[in-house]
Image (spheres, grey):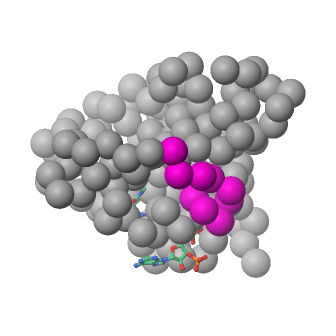
């Protein structure tokens, strides 16, 4: 059983985070200038390294840009570590870290792996937006975390 932890990324982690993202989708990584986005997220303290038994296996970008609520912008677990519960646990940990009592995220309807991970850790379906990726609607999910936190 692996121990999953999150730690805030520093600029020293940039290369590994960029690598995780590049390996997921090389074309998107370049066309969408993801390296710039990752660098900014690290500088803004919005990037978290996912550690499994102290080894970096992925990352989460998390901020409050969605209606001032916790928002999981992106989560990537390196391919060989997927399907072992690491993504779900990382999502759960980021929800505990959130300052707000609700956390939202979204994923394509084709991404059943992300949807399963979200359902497992108690996220509910919030709605569907058409027109972002042609033929692959964006599904929004949310979780109410802790009622003592900042409410919206
Ligand atoms: C989405 C992601 C972060 C989930 O991480 P993970 O460590 O695989 O998550 P978990 O193991 O907690 O849960 C994944 C679930 O999907 C299932 N799964 C595994 N491979 C699958 C596949 N090819 N298709 C559908 N479901 C799959 C797993 O069995 C698991 O469900 P279960 O526990 O009910 O069996 C990871 O798959 C990933 O990095 N994907 C690429 C990047 C991405 O799509 N990010 C999300 C968009 S922001």
- Residue drawn at x 83%, y 32% as measured from the top left: 147
Q: Residue at x 59, y 26 (%)?
A: 69
> Residue 139, can we see it?
yes
Task: Identify which residue, 29 or 152, lies in the foreground.
Answer: 152
Answer yes or no: is residue 18 visible: no
Q: Position of residue 29 (x, y in %)?
A: 22, 48
**The stretch drawn in magenta includes residue 93:** no
Looking at the image, which residue is at 51% across and 45% down? 126
Residue sitting at the far front:
127
Region of the chain picked out in magenta, as a range: 118-126
Instruction: Classify 73 as above or below 45.
Output: below
Quarter of the image with the C terminus is: top right
Total marks shown come to 0
**Residue 57 x, y percent position in the rendering:** 53, 62
* Residue at (59% x, 31% y) in the render: 70
Question: Which is nearer the eye, 56 or 141?
Answer: 141
Look at the picture and state if 87 lies above or below 1.
above
Q: Quadrant of residue 22?
A: bottom left
Q: Position of residue 73 (x, y in %)?
A: 45, 39
What percent of the width, then of the height, locates residue 53? 70, 66
Residue 47, above or below 1: above
Report whether 142 appears left or right of 38.
Answer: right
> Could you say which quadrant of the image residue 140 lies in?
top left
Q: Quadrant of residue 100?
A: top right
Q: Nearer the viewer, residue 88 or 32?
A: 88
Q: From the image, which quarter does the N terminus lie in?
A: bottom right
């Amino acid at each position: 059983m692996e121990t999953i932890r999150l730690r805030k990324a520093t600029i020293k982690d940039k290369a590994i985070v960029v690598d995780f993202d590049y390996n997921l989708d090389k074309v998107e990584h370049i066309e969408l200038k993801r390296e710039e986005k990752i660098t900014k997220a690290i500088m803004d303290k919005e990037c978290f390294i996912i550690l499994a038994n102290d080894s970096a296996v992925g990352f989460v970008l998390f901020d409050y840009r969605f209606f001032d609520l916790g928002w999981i912008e992106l989560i990537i677990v390196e391919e060989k570590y997927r399907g072992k519960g690491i993504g779900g646990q990382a999502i759960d940990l980021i929800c505990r870290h959130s300052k707000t009592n609700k956390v939202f995220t979204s994923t394509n309807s084709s991404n059943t792996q992300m949807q399963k991970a979200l359902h497992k850790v108690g996220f509910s379906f919030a709605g569907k937006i058409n027109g972002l990726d042609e033929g692959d609607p964006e599904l929004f999910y949310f979780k109410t975390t802790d009622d003592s936190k900042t409410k919206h």
